[in-house]
Image (spheres, grey):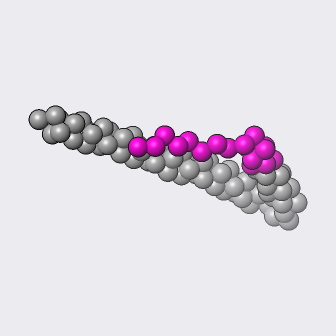
Amino acid sequence: MSDYTPKVSNVWNLFTYLNFAIAALMMAGGIWSLEASFSAKGYYAMAALMLVYSTAGITKALRDQEESDRIYNKLEDAKTEKLLAEVSAA
C-alpha cells in the first residue's frame, strides 16, 4: 500500500488562476462587444457562468468519487491484511 500524494507547484496554481481570469475577461469582452440585444447578451452571460459553475461541480464530483474509491480500497486492503494475519497466526 503506497501513500503517494502528487505535489502541485505554486507556479502551476498561479498559471491556472491567470488562465481562468484571462478567459473570463475575454468572454466578458466578447459578450460586451456583441452586437445583440441586451437580453441576448444576458443569456450568453448566464450561459457562460452556468458553464463555469457546472465545470467546477463536475470536477468536484469526480474528485470526490476518486477519494471515495481510494478510501474504500484502503479499507479493503486493511481487511485483507487483517485476515491474512489471522490465518498465518493460526
Q: Where is residue 41 in the image (x, y as percent from the top left)?
A: 77, 57
In the rendered image, residue 8 lying in the magenta stretch gets the answer: yes
Question: Looking at this rendering, what residue extends furthest in the right direction?
Answer: 33
Residue at 44 percent of width and 47 percent of height? 65
Horizontal arrangement in the rendering, residue 50 relative to residue 70 (left or right): right
Question: Looking at this rendering, what residue extends furthest in the left direction?
Answer: 90
Horizontal arrangement in the rendering, residue 82 relative to residue 53 (left or right): left
90 or 17, nearer to the observer: 90
Q: Position of residue 20 (x, y in %)?
A: 76, 50
Where on the picture, by quarter, is residue 8? top right
Residue at 27 percent of width and 39 percent of height? 81
The number of numbered discs placed on residues in the rendered structure image is 0
Magenta residues, as a range?
1-18
In the rendered image, residue 10 lying in the magenta stretch gets the answer: yes
Where on the picture, by quarter, is residue 29? bottom right
Horizontal arrangement in the rendering, residue 14 relative to residue 76 (left or right): right
Image quadrant where one finds the N terminus? top left
- Residue 50 seen in render: no
Residue at 72 percent of width and 58 percent of height? 44
